[in-house]
Image (cartoon, rainbow, N blue to C red):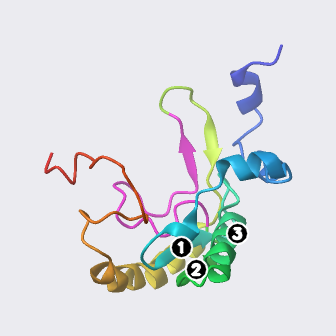
Amino acid sequence: MDTLASRTAIGPIRSTDLSEEALADSAAVALATIAVERIAGDAFLVSGRDDGMSPSTALANIAEERRRVNGRRVTHLAYSGAGHRVGTGFVPGPLTVTHSCHRITGVDDDLGGSWHADFAALDDCWPRILQVLPTWRHRSSPLVSGSRRAPNRWERGR
């Protein structure tokens, strides 16, 4: 019997493999594509080449290419050996976690990377992220040209 427990009993699950299979379906990719070429400001992407949760470097490469083809500025930092949490220095909790146990299902997710590679990537990218933050538009400005989205709770002042 195929149960969640039987699938996780073999060890951590690396979701990237499933996502990479989905990237082969061009119709599904077209439906899921974010129009990054419409983002009004500069784009700043950070990815770990050993991301265990998603093919983040491949997806960032797609976004980077779409921006460049449309004459938009983009910076993409891709770190060898780094996993899913690269660049998340602002997220509470340990900064160099390579596994995550889902609090409801108990599934052990392999986030990829290694402690050393994640930390080295974080050490390199975080100052760069902080350097570009002041150049971004004020949060009340629409991030996407023609955006009609409602302000979120942070923009409303909670």
- Residue position for label 2: 76
Give the structural element (helix, strand or loop) at label 1.
strand
Give the structural element (helix, strand or loop) at label 2.
strand
Residue drawn 77% across the image and 35% down it:
10
- Residue position for label 1: 45
Q: Tell me the tag on residue 62.
A: 3
Gap between marks 1 and 2 measured at Cα? 5 Å
Gap between marks 1 and 3 measured at Cα? 11 Å
Gap between marks 3 and 2 measured at Cα? 11 Å
Q: Nearer the viewer, mark 3 or mark 2?
A: 3
Q: Are marks 3 and 2 in contact (CB under 8 Å)?
A: no
Residue 139 drawn at (x, y percent) = 26, 65
Residue 78 is a magenta residue: no
Of residue 53 and residue 136, the one placed in the foreground of this image is: 136
Classify 86 as above or below 27.
Answer: below
The quadrant in which the N terminus is found is top right
Q: Earlier in the sequence, mark 1 or mark 2?
A: 1
Identify the residue at the far left of this view. 157
The quadrant in which the C terminus is found is top left
Residue drawn 72% across the image and 67% down it:
58
Name the image quarter holding residue 155.
Answer: bottom left
Q: Earlier in the sequence, mark 1 or mark 3?
A: 1
Q: Amino acid at mark 3?
A: Ile
Residue 150 drawn at (x, y percent) = 30, 46
What's the magenta region? 83-102
Give the structural element (helix, strand or loop) at label 3.
helix
Main SS class of the magenta portion in the image: loop
Badge 1 density bin: few <14, some 14–19, many ≥20, Cα 10 Å: some
Q: Amino acid at mark 2?
A: His
Residue 89 is a magenta residue: yes
Residue 146 drawn at (x, y percent) = 41, 61
Residue drawn 69% across the image and 77% down it:
65
